Amino acid sequence: MEATIYLQDVYHITGLGVVPVGEVKSGTLRVGMRAGVNGKTAVVKTIEMHHEQLQEAHAGDNIGFSLGGVGKKDLFKGTTIRFSDQESPAAAMPAGTNPEPIHPKGFLGGLFGRRVR
């Protein structure tokens, strides 16, 4: 089973650790699923939606979830991550996927407000 999550933001909450928030784009995210992120293995510890603890979240759900094994600096707003229930994090993300943003200022590279000639 796999799940694809689009990260809308990433927080660090004392007592929980790294807490990304985003939308489940496809599949079902379950507690215990894994993803390979920057050479580390991220493991889903908890899932929450509307202040309610869940064991799983489905496509279309906007959720917050805590991750073990990675730091806040490993994840970026605008990243799409594929989680898998397989033990190998390499199997959790497709080959060539880079969880870093295209540009530090976002997908448009901070062009808004900049004069282009």
Image: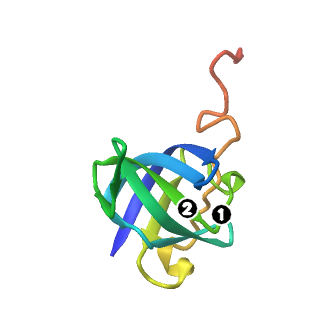
Query: Foreground: 47 or 5?
Result: 47
Q: Residue furthest bottom?
A: 87
The crowding category of the residue bearing disc 1, from other C-alpha atoms within 10 Å (few below 14, some 14 to 19, many at least 20), is some
Dot 2 amino acid type = Leu
Determine if residue 6 is in view.
yes
Query: Foreground: 99 or 116?
Result: 99
- In the rendered view, would you say 37 is above or below 60? below
- In the rendered view, would you say 107 is above or below 86? above
Q: Quadrant of residue 18?
A: bottom right
The residue located at (58%, 55%) in the rendering is 16
- The Cα atoms of the two marked residues, 1 and 2, are separated by 7 Å
Q: Which labelled disc corresponds to residue 45?
A: none
The residue located at (52%, 57%) in the rendering is 66
Dot 1 amino acid type = Val
Q: How is the protein colored in the picture?
A: rainbow
Q: Secondary structure at mark 2?
A: strand
- In the rendered view, would you say 44 is above or below 18? below
Q: Position of residue 72 (x, y in %)?
A: 67, 52
Left or right, 104 with reference to 41: right
Q: Secondary structure at mark 1?
A: loop
Read off the residue under disc 2.
Answer: 67
Left or right, 95 with reference to 47: right
Left or right, 67 with reference to 64: right
Q: Position of residue 75 (x, y in %)?
A: 62, 53
Determine if residue 77 is in view.
no
